[in-house]
């Protein structure tokens, strides 16, 4: 029996290509079937051949040599590779994958092995679409290939199409490596000479593999010895497979193509119309029989106009859009392009797309091998009484209790790994909180199995996997002090003391050179919280954390004194950094032997520096006031009144007050003279000046909670002949403040235009 080579170039996840593969297998009856897929799975093909329910995917992870990588090889029922695998095996052929393993450097950065890779054929696709009057690659594909065609005609059309694409887009270095590897497998199969060889590969590679000769063996590269490379089967979903969800998949709208695979091109449109109408009606959208008839008639008319013998996906979507959407569209229809739809897409169109995407999630056979992480996770959930039940339940934890602290660590590890079903509702997430209680919602999640299997790339146990996830984040954080501080907090929540020490070391190296006050402030805020409140790993009062706080505090004061810009608007994050500096001085100065005199001198210089941003000048005053720097409250209030008067310009006053209120909110509420002075200043402003100052004033007064706003209103109302009891009513505003501001600006513009054309009398203070 001689060897013959039969190349089937395909588009991934195409029902037409899957049918061609099935036809070729029946017609050729091959001895060998080689499939574009990870060759390191060849010894484990039995796992794939169990009675699963697609969609599913091979999840591959790699960690080593200073790099980490994760990728998916997805299959659905109509994937040509899945059909080749299952039907080839059923026919008695020797079935093997022939592509490089996912851990190979050629796949670095490739998240999905079966992505379209439009970079290869964008120009050719554009020319074909322009020539045929079609919008987008997917409409072109349906027009050329998903219409009913005889297998021979389809094969020839695909061959010409892929050769044209390949001719315009030569392979890059990664493709060259992959093709050399695949070619070696094809030639080894031909060299055996024991029967026909069918090769199923992406059409871009088909022209190269068709030139295969013979060689006795294919070399398989082993993974580096110091690396961790794992591959497991995971359930997948239509949502994840859909190009409209962001996956660069072979085909969008998987539910439509599943219908095309199940029922054929003539019956599939009717099934999708029923699914779409059902979904819309379930969501309260009125879809009448007349709408349905109109959509069908429009789709059929478009199909005839486009030369289609059956309705394509685009025909059907265009018909639905034309009959169901009554208003003008703000953005182009999503199916005219690729990728995630615009946020401005009509909500009804969004529901139609979701109907075409489908809700199907795959299921693995119960005999599918499970990674150690899954067993370890289930063990910890059972041991801690955290297993999800039929109904969602709330778990309350006291972090100072050791047994409950261990439950918290398990839950935080799941959170860090992104495992669904474990939602933290309350707890000390922000470093300004001193609460040591947590509440979590534990619920069953359909994606739990897939997410745990995918997380197994980080490690074989729950503790190791969560730590591995943060270790990669540590590599990615670089010199960003705020991100390092976040990682430090996370490591304490996980109970990862070794990692915490590494993060502390990285922070210590960066703290003395951090160039950004905002990032330093965020880091200082977290470190201060840990030093004051952490009981999870003993950071409370820690010498190491305390030394880091002292270094960051000294650097922060230096950065604060370098910031200039007398016209700079208030920056809420910069003010937050000043709060962190003030709180460090307030809560840690004696214990950490901070130089209080130096810090107060910096605040005094900033308050008196005319070149400093107004908000930072106000923050410096607020810091001094809240640190009891002045001899008594009367002196402090007098200093505040003087400094506020000195900045009484519309372009600067609101920013100054934002800084002052952010740092000394409680003190300001108890300062009647300052309140009255501000009331006089606001009352004397022209409408134009008020509009200039308004955005910063809104920020400034936004720092007061409702009760304190009411106290200020009670102090001011009697000066305007109003009852203090009316204060609460003033806090309720039915109108949107932005609308009020826009209306005032419009009124001002109308008056300006009227004056310009002499249609109204000039006011006494108007310029000539």
Image: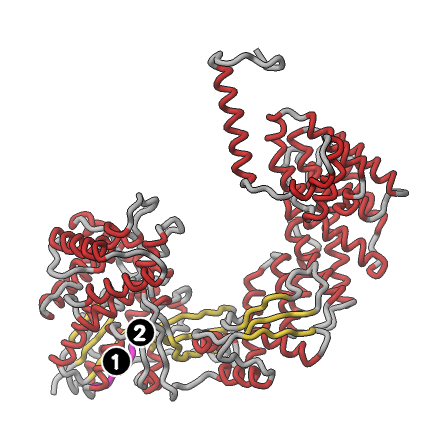
Query: Which is more toward the observer, 730 or 162?
Result: 730
Q: Residue at x 65, y 66 (%)?
A: 427
Vertical arrangement, residue 639 with respect to residue 149, above or below: above
Few, some or many residues within 10 Å of mark 2 (<14, 14–19, 20+): many
Residue 661 lies left or right of residue 321; in this view the side is: right
- What residue sits right under mark 1 in the picture? 85
> Would residue 481 be counted in the magenta stretch?
no
> Would residue 97 be counted in the magenta stretch?
yes
Q: Main secondary structure of the magenta part?
A: strand
Q: Residue at x 56, y 65 (%)?
A: 473
- Where does the image place residue 568, in percent across and percent down from the top left? 63, 36
* Residue 40 in view: yes
- Where does the image place residue 710, in percent across and percent down from the top left? 71, 44
Query: Which is more toward the observer, 214 or 534?
Result: 534
- What residue sits right under mark 2 in the picture? 75
Query: Which is more toward the observer, 229 or 470?
Result: 470
Residue stretch rendered in magenta on the structure: 93-98
Q: Are marks 2 and 1 in contact (CB under 8 Å)?
A: yes
């Amino acid at each position: 029996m001689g060897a013959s080579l039969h190349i089937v170039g395909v588009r991934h996840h195409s029902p037409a290509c899957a049918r061609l593969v099935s036809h070729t297998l029946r017609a050729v009856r091959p001895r060998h079937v080689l499939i574009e897929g990870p060759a390191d799975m060849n010894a484990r093909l039995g796992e794939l051949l169990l009675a699963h329910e697609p969609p599913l995917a091979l999840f591959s992870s790699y960690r080593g040599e200073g790099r980490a990588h994760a990728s998916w090889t997805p299959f659905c029922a109509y994937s040509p590779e899945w059909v080749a695998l299952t039907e080839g095996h059923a026919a008695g052929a020797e079935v093997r994958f022939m592509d490089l393993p996912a851990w190979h450097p050629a796949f670095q950065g490739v998240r999905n092995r079966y992505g379209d890779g439009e970079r290869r054929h964008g120009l050719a696709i554009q020319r074909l679409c322009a020539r045929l009057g079609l919008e987008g690659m997917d409409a072109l594909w349906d027009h050329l290939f998903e219409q009913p065609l005889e297998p021979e005609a389809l094969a020839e059309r695909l061959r010409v199409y892929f050769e044209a694409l390949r001719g315009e887009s030569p392979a890059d270095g990664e493709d060259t490596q992959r093709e050399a590897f695949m070619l070696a497998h094809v030639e080894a199969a031909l060299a055996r000479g024991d029967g026909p060889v069918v090769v199923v590969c992406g059409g871009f590679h088909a022209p190269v593999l068709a030139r295969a000769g013979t060689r006795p063996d294919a070399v398989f590269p082993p993974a580096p010895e110091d690396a961790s490379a794992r591959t497991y089967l995971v359930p997948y979903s239509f949502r994840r497979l859909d190009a409209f969800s962001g996956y660069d998949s072979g085909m969008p709208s998987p539910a439509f193509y599943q219908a095309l695979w199940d029922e054929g091109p003539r019956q599939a449109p009717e099934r999708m119309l029923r699914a779409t109408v059902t979904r819309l009606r379930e969501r309260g959208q009125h879809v009448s029989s007349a709408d349905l008839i109109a959509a069908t008639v429009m789709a059929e008319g478009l199909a005839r106009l486009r030369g289609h013998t059956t309705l394509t996906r685009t025909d059907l979507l265009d018909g639905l859009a034309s009959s169901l959407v009554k208003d003008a569209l703000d953005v182009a229809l999503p199916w005219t392009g690729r990728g995630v739809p615009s946020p401005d897409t009509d909500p009804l169109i969004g529901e139609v797309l979701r109907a075409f995407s489908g809700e199907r999630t795959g299921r693995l056979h119960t005999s599918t091998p499970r990674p150690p992480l899954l067993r370890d996770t289930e063990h910890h959930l059972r041991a801690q009484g955290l297993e999800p039940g039929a109904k969602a339940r709330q778990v309350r934890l006291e972090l100072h209790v050791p047994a409950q602290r261990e439950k918290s660590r398990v839950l935080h590890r799941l959170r860090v790994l992104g495992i669904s079903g474990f939602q933290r509702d309350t707890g000390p997430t922000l470093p300004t909180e001193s609460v040591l209680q947590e509440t979590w919602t534990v619920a069953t999640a359909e994606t739990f199995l897939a997410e745990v299997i995918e997380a197994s790339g980080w490690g074989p146990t729950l503790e190791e996997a969560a730590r591995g996830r943060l270790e990669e984040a540590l590599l990615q954080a670089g010199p960003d002090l705020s991100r390092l501080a976040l990682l430090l907090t996370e490591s304490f929540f996980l109970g990862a003391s070794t990692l915490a020490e590494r993060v502390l070391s990285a922070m210590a190296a960066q703290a003395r050179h951090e160039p950004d006050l905002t990032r330093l402030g965020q880091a200082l805020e977290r470190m201060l919280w840990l030093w004051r409140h952490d009981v999870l790993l003993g950071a409370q009062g820690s010498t190491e954390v305390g030394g880091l706080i002292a270094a960051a505090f000294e650097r922060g004061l230096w950065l604060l004194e370098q910031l200039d810009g007398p016209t700079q608007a208030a920056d809420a994050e910069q003010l937050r950094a000043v709060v962190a500096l003030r709180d460090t001085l307030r809560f840690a100065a004696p214990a950490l032997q901070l130089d209080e005199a130096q810090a107060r001198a910096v605040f005094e210089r900033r308050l008196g520096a005319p070149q400093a941003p107004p908000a930072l000048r106000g923050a410096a005053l607020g810091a001094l006031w809240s640190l009891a720097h002045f001899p008594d409250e009367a002196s402090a209030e007098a200093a505040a009144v003087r400094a506020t008067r000195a900045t009484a310009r519309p372009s600067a006053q609101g920013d100054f007050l934002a800084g002052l209120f952010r740092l000394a909110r409680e003190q300001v509420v108890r300062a009647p003279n300052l309140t009255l002075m501000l009331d006089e200043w606001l009352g004397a402003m022209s409408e134009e000046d008020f509009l200039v100052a308004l955005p910063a004033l809104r920020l400034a007064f936004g720092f007061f909670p409702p009760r304190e706003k009411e106290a200020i209103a009670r102090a001011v109302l009697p000066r305007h002949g109003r009852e203090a009891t009316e204060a609460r009513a003033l806090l309720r505003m039915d109108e949107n403040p932005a609308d009020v501001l826009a209306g005032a600006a419009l009124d001002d513009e109308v008056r300006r235009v009227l004056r310009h054309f002499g249609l109204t009398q000039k006011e006494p203070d108007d310029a000539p």
